[in-house]
Image (cartoon, grey):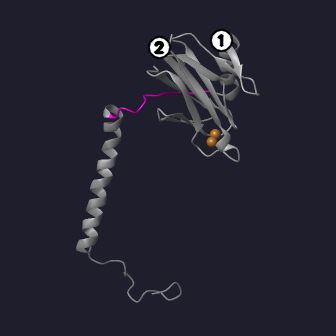
């Protein structure tokens, strides 16, 4: 058989299933089922998974909320770009804006206090990766992700973008501070 000549037998594909082939199909099927049920299992029993909420939003509406928080709770600025460092009250809603190629503002949270951390992107998809805690979330324009966080360690954490978002992707880094009060 070739692409030009038709096969000699018209139903060339109608062969009985080989034992080895059947075995591999069975193995693949069982593995698929295993992986499928691992998803709900790991959501409940895996210690890393966050139960996020997601809401529809628009970049303008989201940045307005972030701006309101920054206007109210900025305690200082950092770097040449004068990035505001924001210390919102414990228990409040805190906003982080992702855009090409920065995170805005820098958040300063208190250890042992709970916050509702909101994340959204202004332009393309970005990835929120908090290191070394290794908490990873997709940040998607038009959607507002909300995560309940209670920092249990103080110090300076790194935020890196872990979704490739263009030529400046590797420069899309920031910080998150957790202070002991
Ligand atoms: Cu933002 Cu990569």
Q: Secondary structure at mark 2?
A: loop
Residue 139: quarter of image: top right
Residue receiving disc 1: 73
Say if 53 sits above or below 126 in the image.
above
Q: Which x, y percent locates residue 159?
A: 58, 33
Label 1: few (<14), some (14–19) or many (≥20) C-alpha neighbours in 10 Å: some
Residue beneath the point at 36% across and 78% down: 13
Q: Which secondary structure class fits the magenta region best?
A: loop
Q: Is residue 25 magenta?
A: no
Q: Are marks 2 and 1 in contact (CB under 8 Å)?
A: no
Direction right: furthest residue: 80
Q: At x 68% / y 14%, what residue is drawn?
A: 74
Residue at 71% of width from left, 13% of height from top?
71
User: Dot 2 corresponds to which residue?
Assistant: 113
Q: Position of residue 19 (x, y in %)?
A: 23, 73
Alpha-carbon distance for marks 2 and 1? 16 Å
Determine which of the numbered discs, if any, sits on residue 17 in the image.
none
Foreground pick, 59 / 87: 87
Neighbourhood count class around disc 2 (C-alpha, 10 Å): few under 14, some 14–19, many 20 upward: some
Quadrant occupied by the N terminus: bottom left
Asked whether mark 2 and ligand 1 are closer than 8 Å, the reply comes as no
Of the pair 137 and 134, the residue shown nearer to us: 134
- Residue 180 in the image: above or below residue 45: above
Would residue 120 be found to the left or right of residue 36 on screen? right
Residue 99 screen position, x and y as percent: 68, 34
Region of the chain picked out in magenta, as a range? 46-57
Determine the secondary structure under disc 1.
helix
Compare marks 2 and 1 and give the one earlier in the sequence.
1
Residue drawn at x 61%, y 25% is 96
């Amino acid at each position: 058989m070739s692409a030009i000549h038709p096969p000699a037998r018209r139903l060339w594909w109608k062969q009985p299933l080989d034992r080895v082939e059947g075995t591999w199909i069975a193995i693949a099927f069982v593995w698929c089922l295993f992986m499928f049920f691992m998803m709900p299992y790991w959501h409940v029993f895996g210690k890393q998974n966050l139960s996020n909420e997601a809401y529809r939003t628009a970049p303008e509406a989201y940045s307005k909320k972030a701006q309101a928080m920054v206007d109210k709770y900025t305690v200082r600025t950092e770097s040449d770009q004068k990035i505001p460092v924001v210390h919102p009250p414990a228990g409040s809603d805190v906003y982080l804006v992702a855009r090409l190629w920065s995170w805005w503002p820098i958040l300063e949270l208190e250890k042992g206090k709970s916050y509702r951390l909101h994340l959204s992107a202004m332009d393309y998809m970005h990835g929120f990766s908090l290191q070394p805690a290794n908490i990873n979330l997709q940040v998607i324009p038009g959607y507002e992700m909300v995560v309940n966080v209670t920092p249990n360690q103080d110090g300076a954490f790194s935020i890196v973008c872990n979704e490739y978002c263009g030529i400046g992707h590797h420069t899309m880094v920031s910080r998150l501070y957790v202070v002991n009060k």
